[in-house]
Amino acid sequence: MLRSLLFAIILATEANAQTNQLTLTGTGSLSSSSIPFLGGDLVPTGTQVTYKTYTGTTTIPSGSLSGSIALLATTIAVANGSIISPSSSGTSSSSRSVTLLQGGQGAFPTTTAAANRTSNSTTSSTTTSSAQPTNTQACNNYPEFCGRKYSNVTYIAAHNSPFVNANNAAANQIYGVVDQLNDGVRMLQGQTHFFDNNIYYCHTSCDLLNAGSAVSYFANITNWIREHPFEVVTLLIGNSDFRNVTDYVAPLQQSGLSNYAYTPPKIPMAIDDWPTLSSMILQRKQVVIFMDYNANQTEVPWILDEFSQVWETPFSPTNASFPCTQDRPPGLSQQDAENRMYLANHNLNTEITALGLSILVPTVPLINQTNGLNGSGSLGAMVDDCSGE
């Protein structure tokens, strides 16, 4: 069993019939028992499947928070609508008091800006410092999360987030990625395939369910991040065709999402190495991008190898008991498991055969039980299991 978590667990149901996935972060010890995977198409096997191990850490040069205070002040002003365009005629004035986030670098100032709009618009401001300013700006919907490390927050994840195709049994979602983010989902997972010389989000096969290009999906996330500058979002890319990680650089850059990608200062990151949400927001590097297989952080440092920094419970389980046991990477020691984040999968599936393929589809009839707060097979029961003694 896992030791009690040090933070509140946030519950939310995934958008489709039965599927839920919680990203539970924190330390914990593992049960010695193991649960076999009961079939399906989502856990790859074979010689292509490898898991990275590290005997030490590699330091990556990183930037500082220099200039980030001014950047954040501008960001807050834009979010509050207090930036006045100089192109309009007439005279008006407005003033707004803003408390800046704490980014782990000591005290930040409180800035009061007064904007006077005329044909020759000017803006003046005064700045004072306080030892410990009170933060009123929420990070991921809660002001108290601003001072927490990324590794000490529970995030709700959407399993196979892009797969929203109506009338398709292989779909996992009803609502698209923007609605998912608006509803509070802060981790987005999905499997990708190489199709027509591009990266696409497809469920098992692009002939079965093709949700569109990766660059289009990434662009939707980018637009949302630009409109929500105080949110930290995690993207977990399923590299189902084991493509080289460099194949993903172009779509991430073309979508603009790479501009917000967090680059860790070391490889791998232990659970206590992660920055606070506020420091990531201050630097506008608030998208953490993981890849399950074939990530290479020495080649692309901002696409993070998942399994050297996160372990998972059984993935896409057909076992309605949802055991909170370590599944991937295999053979992980208890000591190593306690030093990284973990992801608890809570999505009940039925195995079917279609187009000659064995795939897992949502067990729709059990939606209320699977997404419930209590009872056998419920999300609440798995949370209690994972956070119990």
Image (cartoon, rainbow, N blue to C red):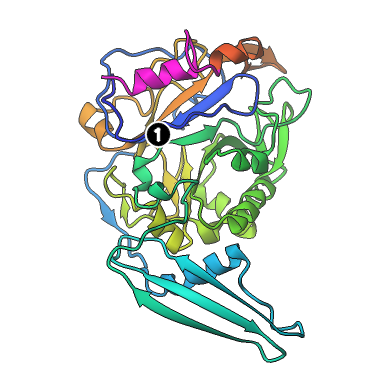
Residue 46 rendering spot, x and y as whole percentages:
46, 25
Q: Is residue 50 above or below residue 278?
A: above
Q: Is residue 279 above or below residue 70?
A: above
Mark 1 surroundings: few (<14), some (14-19) or many (≥20) residues within 10 A: few
Q: Is residue 189 magenta?
A: no
Residue 112 rendering spot, x and y as whole percentages:
48, 74
Which span of residues is magenta-colored? Answer: 371-389
Q: Is residue 329 visible?
A: yes
Q: Is residue 200 visible?
A: no
Residue furthest out toward the top: 376
Total marks shown come to 1
- Does residue 278 appear to the left or right of 32 in the view shown? right
Q: Is residue 32 above or below residue 328?
A: above
- Residue 178 picture quarter: top right
- Does residue 99 appear to the left or right of 352 in the view shown? left
- Does residue 364 appear to the left or right of 186 in the view shown? right
- Looking at this view, is 137 or 379 the one in front? 137
Residue 78 rendering spot, x and y as whole percentages:
59, 67
Which amino acid type is marked by label 1? Answer: Thr
* Residue holding disc 1: 50
- Residue 207 picture quarter: top right
- Does residue 371 appear to the left or right of 107 in the view shown? right
Q: Residue at x 29, y 34 (%)?
A: 6
- Looking at this view, is 199 or 324 the one in front? 324
Residue 159 rendering spot, x and y as whole percentages:
56, 30
Quadrant housing the C terminus = top left
Q: Residue at x 71, y 36 (%)?
A: 211
Q: Is residue 214 above or below residue 265?
A: above
Q: Is residue 377 magenta?
A: yes
Q: Secondary structure at mark 1?
A: loop
Quadrant housing the N terminus = top left
